């Protein structure tokens, strides 16, 4: 499992990690300024209290209620990641003195074919699952196709959403999980920790308030576990990058749902979701995906996640 040992190639004193996370927070915060400015303008024009408006928006990020198109709203949401990504890149290589690609795999070269395969396979599984759900209850879906709006959305989804999903993967399945590999010998431990942290960063999502804390956190933590497991078993992050991008792009372009964090002009919109069913469907898709990839890429057994790995620490 060379992937999880990559941190040993760089400089790993604790203060380097602190500075990288400080840099990420600064970059992310700067990226939120356009959204804040847009909502402040709405507050000024409508006379609503700005803090009250922010709380209402956090609970229901429906931009159309604030006179902002869904596409422009999606752009505003993605700005945080567009700013945070380059800040993370420069902070990482400057402080840890190792290749940024080492966060993706130990080969120092990105396997784009594997990213594309993971993306296509996951979208295909998601589309089949969604088709079955549509057949069970078509009344829960609304067709909302608008060519002009859809083309702009497609552009945003294909070129900008991957920045958001890649940033999250690089931080959680790359940076944090490799950090965990420095501290813990069993790979399953950093997988569990990063999955819980992945769930924690989604505590502010509107889905939590609408559909319940326990079922939605079960979904987010399960997603984190799945992405962490396939990263370690595949000894690289390419499949996780493809899956995460496929999840968010399909959710933005194909089927969105009421109460979701991404309110877009997707092809179809669900009026509501059953979070427990969503978890079950996700787990079925995750198992099928893992079985296919295990055969295709000759993965080691899951038992390897519970075996010690040796790593040389470099705290210079």
Image (tube, rainbow, N blue to C red):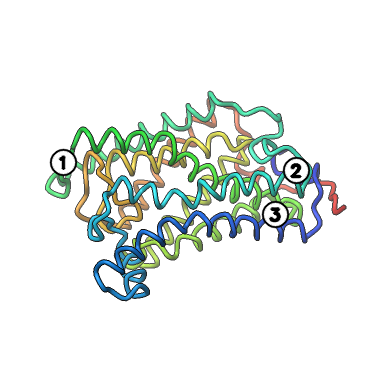
Q: Return the disc, 1 or 2, that comes first in the chain's sequence.
A: 2
Q: Position of residue 161 (x, y in %)?
A: 43, 41
**How far across and down, in percent of the image, does residue 49 sit?**
32, 76
Residue at mark 3 = 180
N-term mark: 3 or 2: 2
Q: CA distance from mark 1 to mark 3?
A: 45 Å
Residue in view at x 50 percent, y 41 percent: 163
**Residue 290 image point, x, y percent:** 49, 36
Local secondary structure at mark 1 = strand
Marks 1/2: CA–CA distance: 48 Å
- Say whether residue 228 is left or right of residue 107: left
Mark closest to the chain's N terminus, 1 or 3: 1
Give the number of callouts.
Answer: 3
Residue that label 1 marks: 143
Q: Label 2 near label 3: C-beta < 8 Å? A: no
The one of 148 and 305 positioned closer to us in this rendering: 148
Residue carrying label 2:
5
- Give above or below for 159 relative to 36: above
Neighbour tally class for label 1: few under 14, some 14-19, many 20 plus, Cα within 10 Å: few
Instruction: Give the residue drawn at x 71%, y 34%.
Output: 106
User: Given contact means CB atoms under 8 Å apart, are the residues at marks 1 and 2 in contact?
Assistant: no
């Amino acid at each position: 499992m060379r992937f999880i040992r990559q941190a040993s190639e760089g400089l790993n004193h604790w203060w380097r990690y602190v500075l990288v996370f400080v840099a990420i927070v600064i970059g992310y915060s700067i990226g939120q300024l356009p959204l804040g400015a847009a909502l402040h303008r709405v507050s000024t024009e409508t006379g609503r209290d700005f803090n009250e408006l922010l709380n209402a928006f956090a609970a229901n990020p429906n931009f159309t209620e604030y006179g902002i198109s869904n596409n422009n709203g999606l752009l505003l949401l993605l700005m945080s990641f567009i700013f945070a990504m380059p800040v993370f890149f420069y902070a990482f290589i400057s402080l840890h003195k190792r290749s940024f690609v080492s966060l993706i795999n130990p080969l120092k070269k990105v396997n784009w074919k594997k990213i594309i395969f993971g993306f296509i396979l996951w979208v295909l599984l998601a589309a089949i699952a969604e088709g079955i759900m549509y057949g069970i209850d078509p009344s829960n879906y609304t067709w909302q196709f608008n060519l002009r709006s859809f083309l702009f959305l497609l552009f945003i989804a294909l070129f900008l959403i991957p920045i958001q999903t890649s940033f999250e993967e690089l931080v959680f399945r790359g940076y944090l999980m490799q950090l965990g590999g420095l501290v813990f010998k069993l790979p399953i431990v950093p997988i569990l920790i990063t999955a819980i942290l992945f769930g924690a960063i989604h505590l502010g999502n509107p889905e939590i308030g609408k559909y319940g804390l326990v079922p939605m956190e079960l979904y987010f933590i399960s997603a984190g576990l799945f992405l962490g497991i396939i990263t370690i078993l595949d000894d690289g992050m390419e499949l996780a990058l493809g899956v995460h991008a496929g999840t968010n792009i399909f959710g933005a372009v194909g089927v969105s749902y009421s109460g979701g964090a991404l309110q877009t002009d997707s092809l179809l919109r669900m009026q509501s979701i059953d979070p427990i069913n969503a978890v079950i469907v996700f787990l079925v898709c995750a198992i099928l995906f893992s079985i296919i990839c295990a055969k295709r890429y000759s993965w080691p057994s899951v038992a390897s996640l519970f075996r010690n790995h040796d790593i040389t620490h470099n705290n210079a």
